[in-house]
Image (cartoon, grey):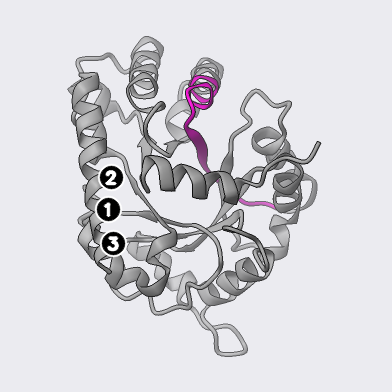
Amino acid sequence: MTCEPFGARLRRAMDIRGPLCVGIDPHASLLTSWGLNDDIAGLERFTLTVVEALADRVAVLKPQSAFFERFGSRGIAVLEKGVEEARAAGALVLMDAKRGDIGSTMGAYAATYLDKDSPLFSDALTVSPYLGFGSLRPALDAAVLSGAGVFVLGLTSNPEGAEVQRATAADGRSLAQVMLDHVAAENEDAEPLGSVGVVIGATLGDAGVDLAVNGPLLAPGIGAQGATPADLPGVFGAAVGNVLPSVSRGVLRHGPDASGLREAAERLTDEVRAAVQES
């Protein structure tokens, strides 16, 4: 049976639920601000509260794997439960693990997150292409088979990223543009949206690259990092309709009350819609 591609599922979710991705980032400081202990019980309470509050209304939930991995196997068990419950409630799950390796190791990462039989199967996975775009082939192929997606790091919001991403390839293109061109080739002829996305920081100002990749553009940096929905047209230009802004602390700080989380997410969704429609 052919799986519906991630790009089509994401386009529908963004159109119906609104273009917003909410991170599930259980920082120790956030657990404390919620009145929770920085332990497995606190981790589980935090994660399931976010899922129960938002999974039936936001397009995408994005757990940051590192904050679960730090608790070892018990943390991964909480992550598995959160992914399962979020997907059951209708949210697409983007696993923010930024995996990048070569050969059989990349294949193992792909099997972990992009194989439907895996307990950590997610609708999409963040990956790093800076071992060469070809190193991502096991993940790209696995995603096609399962109807999942990948988000390739392009121009990230951290200042240190520029020394690699803005470096110049032999043909004069920036390395980020090289990766974007590879993504565009992967998404060629896909409708209504390709399943290979790119991570482009919303804090960059004019991105200075060609963003016409026919795929989703994950835009971290809204909220705590200083970007606002009104900044999106200036960064993304004609591609702004394919932007999926990502926010974590800007929503999560309104917990632990579920209504506070919902109100914050709904407000940001409305602001993004307004910014996109005005562009």
Query: Label for residue 269?
Result: 2
- Residue occupying the point 58% across, 58% down: 192
Image quadrant where one finds the N terminus: top right
Could you tell which of marks 1 and 3 lies nearer the N-terminus? 1
- Range drawn in magenta: 82-101
Q: Nearer the viewer, mark 2 or mark 3?
A: 3
User: How far across and down, in percent of the image, does residue 248 sit?
Assistant: 31, 40
User: How far across and down, in percent of the image, does residue 154 sit?
Assistant: 49, 64
Q: Amino acid at mark 1?
A: Val
Q: Residues within 10 Å of mark 2 (few under 14, many from 20)?
A: many
Q: Amino acid at mark 2?
A: Thr
Q: Amino acid at mark 3?
A: Gln
- Identify residue for label 3: 277
In the figure, is residue 101 to the left or right of 231? right
Is residue 152 a member of the stretch shown in magenta?
Answer: no
User: How far across and down, in percent of the image, does residue 83 sit?
Assistant: 52, 25
- SS of the residue under disc 2: helix
Asked if residue 175 can be seen in this view, the reply is: yes
Image quadrant where one finds the C terminus: bottom left
Asked if residue 256 can be seen in this view, the reply is: no
- Identify residue for label 1: 272
Question: Which is nearer the eye, 276 or 219?
Answer: 276
Q: Quadrant of residue 262?
A: top left
In the rendered view, tell whether residue 47 sits above or below residue 245: above
User: How far across and down, in percent of the image, does residue 20 sit?
Assistant: 36, 45
- Residue occupying the point 30% across, 54% down: 221
In the rendered view, tell whether residue 136 sits above or below residue 67: below
Q: Quadrant of residue 243?
A: bottom left
In the rendered view, tell whether residue 182 sits above or below residue 68: below
What is the distance, in whole Å, between disc 1 and disc 3 at their CAs? 9 Å
- Residue occupying the point 54% across, 57% down: 197
- SS of the residue under disc 3: helix
